[in-house]
Image (cartoon, helix red, strand yellow):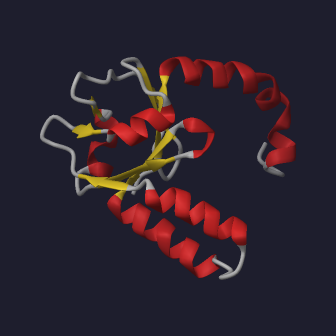
Amino acid sequence: MATLLGTYTPKLDEKGRLILPAKFAEDFEHGIVLTRGQDRCLYVYSAAEFDAVHQRMRASATGNNKQTRDFMRLLLSAAHAETPDRQRRVTVPAALRGYAGLERELVVIGAGNHAEIWDAEAWNDYVSSTEDDFATAAGEVIPDLF
């Protein structure tokens, strides 16, 4: 799987579908998993990557840790498998659209091993609220990055 990069601005149609970016087509052609993401966005994994993420969660899960159980429950209970059609369209289930507050205008970003779907206004607010921290935090967040 290639590293997913970039920012795209598809629209949600009246049937709750969006067209995934062409740059992601090869990674997502064998199926995707849409699920609840952090910060009120949706995560989009290739089916293979979602399986790998699930296996890492299971391997690291400490059976009686409430935080681990809560995280896994929320991520997995919202998961929805889908195969993009020939036009790269996928349907976003109503529950996930509601969770992320998705309206017609969307932003899809590449986030490394997955993509994220944001309501355009929510994405712009997020970027505005985190830009100053981004400008100063690289060394603290990821040591020796630059």
* Identity of the residue drawn at 59% across and 18% down: 124
Q: Nearer the viewer, residue 5 or 44?
A: 44
Residue 54 versus residue 22 in the image, above or below = below
Residue 55 versus residue 101 in the image, above or below = below
* Identity of the residue drawn at 40% across and 34% down: 97
Q: Is there any visible trace of residue 20 in the rendered image?
A: yes
Q: Quadrant of residue 127?
A: top right
Q: Where's residue 114, x and y in %?
A: 47, 49
Which quarter of the figure is the C terminus placed in?
top right
Which quarter of the figure is the N terminus placed in?
bottom left
Q: Nearer the viewer, residue 84 or 141?
A: 84
Q: Nearer the viewer, residue 82 or 26?
A: 82
Image side of residue 39 versus residue 132, left or right: left
Residue 146 versus residue 46 in the image, above or below = above
Image side of residue 110 versus residue 29, left or right: right
Image side of residue 47 versus residue 119, left or right: left
